[in-house]
Each structure stands twice: as C-alpha cells, then as structure tokens.
Image (cartoon, rainbow, N blue to C red):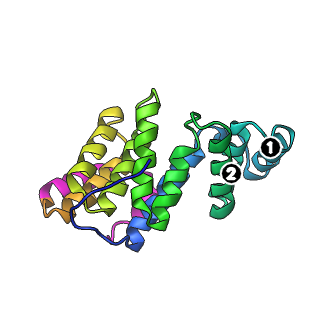
Amino acid sequence: MNDMSDATIIRISMAEAAIFIVMAGILAGGAYMRNHTWGNGFILWADAVAKSPSKSRPHTNLGMLRDLSGDIVAAEEEYKRAISLEPDYVAPYGPLAVIYGKRGDTARAIGMFRWVLDNWRGNDPRLHTGLGIAYMDRGLFREAEEEFKKALVAEPRYEIAHYNLARLYDEMGLKDLAMRHYMAYRELAPAGRTAGRQRE
C-alpha cells in the first residue's frame, strides 16, 4: 500500500481534510453502527478484545468506534494491531488509509486503498472514492477521475463520488461537468450534508 507519481502536488485544504473525515465516518460506520449505540458498541468490542486479544475483528471494530469518537491515535493502534495479527484481513485497511489521508500522507493512503481493492472481492464505491480523493490531493486528476467513475459504476447514486467529481472537474476547469455532478450530489445527499458545502 504505497506510491504516487508526478503531476502538481496539491496541499490538503481544510475542505479536502473534511472530505477524508467524511470518508472515515462512512468507511468506519458500516452496518454494525446501525445496530449499537456508541456506548454499547464500545463496551461490546472492548470486552471482545479483552477476551480474544489475538483476533483481528475485535481490534478492527474497536478501532472503528474510537475513530468515530475522534480518538484517531487509538483507532490507528487498533487497526495496526488487527493487521499485525492477520495481514490478509482487509477490513482495517480502508479506515487506516483514511487516517493517513487526513494526515496528508496520501502516498501511503493510495497504496493502502490499492491493496484493499486488489485483495477484496467486492466493488465498494467508498473505497474507490477514498482512493480518488487521495489521488486528487496529489494532483493526479486523471487517476482520481477514473476512481470516482468506478465508484459510480458500482453505485450510480453514491453522492460522495458525485461531490468529489464536481470538485475535481472544477479544479480542471470543466465547469459544465462540475455543475452536472454537483447537481446530482445536491439531489442525492441528505439535506443537512449539502448545506455546509453550498458555499464551496
């Protein structure tokens, strides 16, 4: 999980960092967060880690809860522990890649996202979008465009991919395409999410 090449390197702006934060919530949230409150989930997975410290899944799920609570350092430790216990278990790699992206280590994030996509049987639009965001932050616009498009092939109504395509096309000066995807984002995104991004 690691690499990158030329093109204009773009510093991560606050908006880009915010996108990685949204991705962290989306990747880490998953199905189990719909079934547990944070407190109950934390107790459940902390207990699972205590009883099965050599299993990857409890460390991954505890990491996700720490991630969602804002304790990124502890989340990273749990993800890395899960990976060290079971390197072929793909679940902790995506959220860990998001943490690297938020810190500006996009080379490592890209490598990690690529590894997950190469080793996971599914076609998750969140992973393609995360990789696209990392590419965009490195100024690799064509690669980013390809990943966002793959996300939309996997899930045409995935609003985060539309939003990032809009940002990308705006950066590339392709205003009509940018507007088309921004309008798709506005139509598909939950009402509260669009409000903060309209100024952008």
Q: Earlier in the sequence, mark 1 or mark 2?
A: 1
Q: What's under tag 2, amino acid-wise?
A: Glu
Residue 164 image position (x, y, % from top left): 31, 55
Q: Classify mark 2: helix, strand or loop.
A: helix
Left or right, 168 with respect to 101, comes to left
* Residue 9 shows in the view: yes
For label 2, the residue is 78
Question: Residue visible at 82% across and 37% down?
Answer: 52
Q: What's under tag 1, amino acid-wise?
A: Val
**Residues at discs 1 and 2 in contact (Cβ within 8 Å):** yes
Residue 122 image position (x, y, % from top left): 44, 28
Residue 142 image position (x, y, % from top left): 20, 51
Q: In the depicted view, which residue is nearer to us: 110 or 131?
A: 110
Q: Is residue 152 magenta?
A: no
Q: Classify mark 1: helix, strand or loop.
A: helix
Question: Residue visible at 48% across and 64% down?
Answer: 102
Residue 12 image position (x, y, % from top left): 38, 70
Among the 4 quarters of the image, the one containing residue 15: bottom left
Task: Kindly report the secondary structure that dominates the magenta region of the rendered protein.
Answer: helix
Q: In the depicted view, which residue is nearer to us: 157 or 72?
A: 72
For label 1, the residue is 49
Q: Is residue 199 magenta?
A: yes
Q: In the depicted view, which residue is nearer to us: 110 or 123?
A: 110
Classify mark 2: residues with Cα within 10 Å, few (<14), some (14-19) or many (20+): many
State the CA–CA distance, disc 1 to disc 2: 10 Å
Magenta stretch bounds: 176-200
* Residue 187 shows in the view: no
The tally of labels here is 2
